[in-house]
Image (spheres, coloured by chain):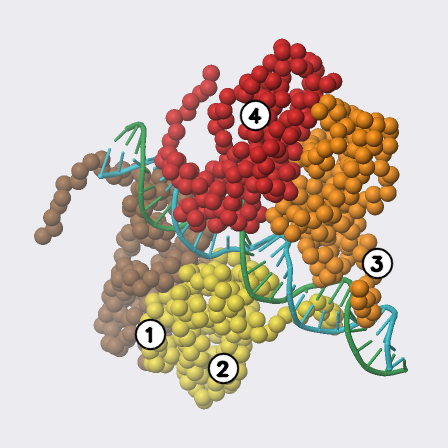
Chain colours: A red, B orange, C brown, D yellow, E green, F cyan
Amino acid sequence: MTTVTTPRGRPRDARVHAAILAATTELVAETGYAAMSLGAVAARARVGKDTLYRRWSGKAELVYEAVFTTTDTAPVPDTGSLEGDLAAMTQQLIDEFSTPAAIAALPGLLADFAADPDSRARIRSDFLTPAKERLVDVFERARERGESAADVDTDLVLDALVGTVVFRLGVLGDPPDPRLARSIAGITAKGIEAR
Amino acid sequence: MTTVTTPRGRPRDARVHAAILAATTELVAETGYAAMSLGAVAARARVGKDTLYRRWSGKAELVYEAVFTTTDTAPVPDTGSLEGDLAAMTQQLIDEFSTPAAIAALPGLLADFAADPDSRARIRSDFLTPAKERLVDVFERARERGESAADVDTDLVLDALVGTVVFRLGVLGDPPDPRLARSIAGITAKGIEAR
Amino acid sequence: MTTVTTPRGRPRDARVHAAILAATTELVAETGYAAMSLGAVAARARVGKDTLYRRWSGKAELVYEAVFTTTDTAPVPDTGSLEGDLAAMTQQLIDEFSTPAAIAALPGLLADFAADPDSRARIRSDFLTPAKERLVDVFERARERGESAADVDTDLVLDALVGTVVFRLGVLGDPPDPRLARSIAGITAKGIEAR
Amino acid sequence: MTTVTTPRGRPRDARVHAAILAATTELVAETGYAAMSLGAVAARARVGKDTLYRRWSGKAELVYEAVFTTTDTAPVPDTGSLEGDLAAMTQQLIDEFSTPAAIAALPGLLADFAADPDSRARIRSDFLTPAKERLVDVFERARERGESAADVDTDLVLDALVGTVVFRLGVLGDPPDPRLARSIAGITAKGIEAR
DNA sequence: ACTTAACCGAGACGGTACGTCCAGTCTTACT
DNA sequence: AGTAAGACTGGACGTACCGTCTCGGTTAAGT
């Protein structure tokens, strides 16, 4: 049972929250992650710096919330084949990482997260875990169809999908090729089935 | 024809060069990429800051030379199977990225490179191209053995190998699992062969 | 004729007033004038910051009321000699300025008042005027006794007494010497008489 | 014997020093002591903030050097009478404190110095001591002329002169009356002689 | 031997961002 | 309407780096 303490004092303004996130998304896309200062975000959002630090611990947390808060409403793909499902999931990943803000933010954001053990753990728990659950569903169905053996290393497959997409789009800056998802899924699915 | 201008004045001291690279490797491993300042490197190497900037354009270039200068003497693997060759190459990659300095440097270094179009191009030309040539050799031999079709997307395979390893070791900070190379190579090789 | 508007709503709580003044006196003595924030006063008095600003215009006004509200009940000294009367008045001044809170508050308070023309005028009208009236009485009696000529520059004498005491106790931080009042009064009285 | 260590590195630029002091004097006169920020000084002097903090520990030290660095070349007055000498010295004091920058700076500067024990000691040692030496000379001559007894409390007289002038000009903001020095000196001199 | 030009250590320089703190105002729910 | 709590804008603080510059002094190659 959670003790719900009645909040006291002036409640936080949701419009302020939204204005900050919007300013962050704009600025990171315009100037890049490293060149974006929190002072500039505050100025663009017409907000004091304190208001930023009251809600987020620093640049990384702020950008993470601003850029990667896909409510993830898309259903788990069910195309009837492992390869089709993997391609659909990879495409979802590419779509999420292909916005101008995401492309500009990704490498710097991951670098900042990687520099702190707690944040590193958050990548796994907050970002990868939901995707892994969807991937487990996909493999479960593939196993029922007899396409895949039971003991697939789901973590490795997920890390490979994410790592490949991040490296291509974020680090190398390649334009999002519409065939990319199918290519990746093709190799991966066949590699798993053939074991 | 390159005009070789005879250098005049005092020649650069090779010991200074080495001292800077050593200090860089130490500091990046101790404090991390972002927290490592060039002033600290200069102080540790007992060198003026100008001496750094005379030789490298900034932190990224310096760290790149200090950490990733594997003279790459290892021969192209030839184990007799595509899977074996891929596993050997992946292991070489993991070895290169598993030193304390490399793990600490990788995400921040890639972020800095990714932020500048010229540097981004250098990742392809300086770092990936040598690896790609080795990978082309491997695929060539596999094709001769009949393990693989002609039209393998070498770039994609390479990006996947590098991206996966970087994400695992650099971003997530996972300890280097001795079975990792085989796992990755297994899926990839079978995925390619099964096409 | 003053229009007495009947106050509407909840009347102000006198105990709140007292708690704020007490917290102010404590904090200014503990931390000094500049380091004392109104937020800290509010917290110590268990009061909202608005309650402070509703009653005082800022730090200077609040500290002034908290520290210098000697209801000045002491009678005008009448020792029978100019020197004795001046010594008594100077001692009253020293007593008022010698509390820990007053010593800590004085220089900063005067600086804040001095920075604003209106507040500067208030030093004369609110603080110096009552003292001047008492000093005029003293000189009046001295003149009747034949100790002093009619045209004494009362303002100058008062400014000299206050300025000297403030400089000694507040600025230089000298401990209050019990002979100080007599020394100052001695020179001043003889200087006036000898004209 | 003082060990003169050879200065290493780039020497400090005297023009930078002068530009900062000039900007400080201007700004403190324009905006007042409290409202003058070191950031504004740096901007006006076209200088980085670090350069300020490298030379001065804070606002108080900077303003002190900028405003109160009278090389004090004026000779010790020798008018032939104690009253005349005191009047001359008081006038020197008034002149030093009557510049726009000094008037604006004095109360806030004294408040900041008073808040720190070390700085408080510096008022005595750096500012008052030279004046005291001159005052001792004056009293010495007066004693030789038979105008004054031997045991004058020089510190008290000096504190009274300074305190009175500071209070009048700095705190109350009175315009510098040309008769002020004579009035103060008149009372003080007669008060001393009459003992 | 002497000149010349680049190298070198040290640290000052202009500039930008950091994260914290406070002032003074405003917005809730409660009394 | 007064009140406690605390969010809000705005701005100064003092620190840390960046990348450049300016010193005194060193080290070879070319004269």
Query: Do discs 2 and 1 share a chain?
Result: yes
Q: Which callout, 2 or 1, points at the residue further toward the start of the chain?
A: 2
Give percent across and percent down for residue B151. 72, 33
Q: Amino acid at mark 2?
A: Val
Residue underneath mark 1: D175
Residue holding disc 3 = B14
* Residue type of the residue flagged with mark 1: Pro
Q: Residues within 10 Å of mark 3 (few under 14, many from 20)?
A: few
Q: Give the spatial CA distance, label 4 vs label 2.
A: 98 Å
Q: Is residue C21 left or right of residue B190?
A: left
Q: Residue at x 33, y 78 (%)?
A: D177
The amino acid beneath tag 4 is Ala
Dots 4, 1 in contact, CB < 8 A: no
Residue where numbered disc 4 is placed: A88
Residue situated in front as seen by the camera: B61 or F9:
B61
Identify which residue, B117 or B101, lies in the foreground: B117
Q: Is A26 drawn above or below residue C89 in the view shown?
A: above
Of all chains, the one bearing label 4 is A
Mark 4, other Cα within 10 Å: few <14 / some 14–19 / many ≥20: some
Of tags 4 and 1, which is closer to the observer? 4
Q: Residue furthest bottom?
A: D80
Pointer 1 chain: D
Mark 2 Cα shell of 10 Å, populated few (<14), some (14-19), many (≥20):
many
* Element on which disc 2 rests: helix
Name the residue that disc number 2 marks.
Answer: D138
Q: Is residue D7 above or below residue B100?
A: below
Determine which quarter of the picture holds residue C195: bottom left
